Image (spheres, grey):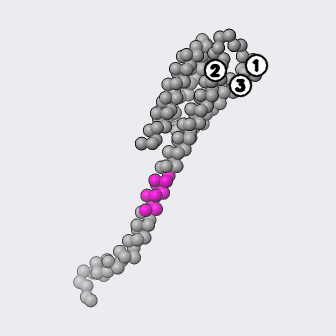
Amino acid sequence: MTCYLGWVACHAREIWIAVGPLAGVIIGSYIARRTQRKHWIADKKREEYRELITVLTGAFNSMRRRGHVKHVPTSEEQLHMMAAEDLAKITISDRIFIEQEVREMKILNRWMSLLDRFNADGDINAMSNGVGDIKANLVYAALQLLK
């Protein structure tokens, strides 16, 4: 068979039969790897949100015990409360996957303001409202990952 269009044009079908499946495998692998990475990052972000919410809740519960007017905390309880406050600060600060979101929501600044206010006036209701707002922001951001 004589082909006047050139070697590639005449043998394009045979070339595609050999190269086409390989190209499909490479493209499919790239898409799968990219999708898997996005899911992995989203899982890690949700995990960090969950850890942060858990630690903030624990620290708030520790403060709630201190907020009772008639209750004078023992030195052991005070150490526990200080440890919970420190753990909350560390957990807010050591986020890797949600660091940008935590910074944009100003979680550390808000938490420190709540602690300062609570340590000054002992108003557990204000602390509860502030922690509730922070947790609501974190839950909303975590749920956005599902979309």
Q: Nearer the viewer, residue 123 or 14?
A: 123
Counting from the top left corner in percent of width and height, residue 79 is at 73, 23
Whether residue 136 sits left or right of residue 67 in the image: it is left
Q: Residues within 10 Å of mark 3 (few under 14, many from 20)?
A: some
Q: Nearer the viewer, residue 69 or 117?
A: 69
Disc 2 from disc 3: Cα separation:
10 Å
Residue positioned 40% across, 67% down in the render: 24
Q: Which residue is mark 2?
A: 63
For the stretch drawn in magenta, what is the main secondary structure?
helix
Q: Is residue 117 visible?
A: no
Q: Nearer the viewer, residue 99 or 51?
A: 51
- Quarter placement of the C terminus: top left
> What label sits on residue 75 in the rendered view?
1
Residue positioned 54% across, 16% down in the render: 126
Q: Is residue 2 visible?
A: yes
User: Amino acid under label 2?
Assistant: Met
User: Amino acid under label 3?
Assistant: His
Q: SS of the residue at dot 3?
A: helix
User: Amino acid under label 1?
Assistant: Ser
Q: Nearer the viewer, residue 99 or 71?
A: 71
Residue positioned 50% across, 32% down in the render: 138
Counting from the top left corner in percent of width and height, residue 32 is at 46, 58
> What label sits on residue 80 in the rendered view?
3
Q: Is residue 56 above or below residue 23?
A: above
Counting from the top left corner in percent of width and height, residue 81 is at 68, 23
Disc 3 from disc 1: Cα separation:
9 Å
Quarter of image, res 119: top right
